Amino acid sequence: MVIALVAGGSVLALFIYNLDTERYGDERTTAWAMARFFTVLTNLIVAVTFGAAALRRNGINASWLAALTLAIVLVGAVFHVLLSGITTYEGLGEWANQGLHTFVPITCLLWWIIFAPKRALHYRDLPIFIAWPCVYMAYALARGAQDSTYPYPFIDLTEISAMAAALNLAGLLIVLLLGGVVFVMIGRFVDR
C-alpha cells in the first residue's frame, strides 16, 4: 500500500507542481500533457495494481506483477541514465520527480524480490513483459504524429529519423525481454 500511495501521490504532486509553475496551462491541459509520459502512466498503473494487491486476498497475477515491476525499473533506469539532466525541478516538483523515478522503482523491485509470487512465472510469459511498453509506444507515436510533440528524445521524430527511433524502441524491447528472462530465472531460483 505504501508503494501505491507514493506512486499515486508523486503523480498528484507533479500535477500540482506543473499547475503552480504554469508549465502546461490549466488543469485539463496539464493532465493531458502529463498523460503523454510513460513515467506518469506507469506510476499510475503501479498505484492501481499495488493498491489492489494490498486490498485483495487472492493477490494479483504473478506475471503481471513481474512485468509491471520490470517496466517501473525501466522508468528509473532510463531516467537516471539518459534523461535526468533534461528537466530540473524544485521543491514539490523535485520530491515528485524522485518519487516517480527513484523511490517507486527501487521499492517495487525490492518488494517483488522479497514478497511477490514467483512460482507461476514461465518463459511463455515473456510477451507480457513487453505488452504495456508496446501499447505505450504506439500511443506515444500516434500522439506525436498528431501534434509533433514527443515525450522522449529517443522517439522524437522531429529530431531523429524514423529508423533511429525504431532502433531505439527495438533496443528497449530487447532489454525488456532480457529482463523478463532474468525475472523468470530469479523466480525459478527462488522457488528452489
Image: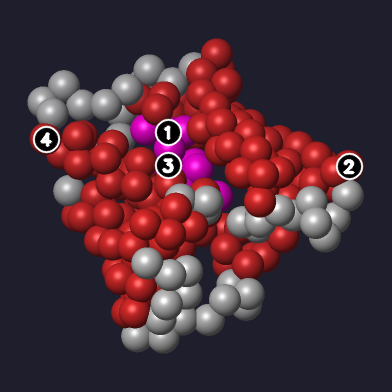
Q: Distance between the residues labelled 2 and 3?
A: 29 Å
Q: Of marks 4 and 1, which one's residue comes earlier in the chain?
A: 4
Boundaries of the magenta span: 65-74
Which residue is labeled 4 in the image? 55
Mark 1: amino acid:
Ala
Mark earlier in primary sequence (4, 3)? 4
Estimate the x, y position of residue 191 in percent, counting from the top left.
37, 25
Residue 172 screen position, x and y as percent: 69, 43
Three-letter amino acid code at the position of disc 4: Leu
In-image side of 30 versus 54 (left or right): right
Name the residue tied to disc 3.
Answer: 69
The first of marks 2 and 3 along the sequence is: 3
Residue at 35% across / 73% down in the picture? 19
- Which quarter of the image is occupied by the C terminus? top left
In this rendering, would 166 be left or right of 143?
A: right
- Element class at badge 4: helix
Q: Can residue 50 be seen in this view?
A: yes
Q: Is residue 16 magenta?
A: no
Query: Is the residue under label 2 in contact with that under label 4 (CB below 8 Å)?
Result: no
**Mark 1: few, some, or many residues within 10 Å (few <14, many ≥20)?**
many
Which of discs 1 and 2 lies nearer the camera? The answer is 2
Q: Is residue 137 visible?
A: no
- Identify which residue, 45 or 108, lies in the foreground: 45
Amino acid type for the residue under numbered disc 2 = Met
CB under 8 Å between callouts 3 and 1? yes
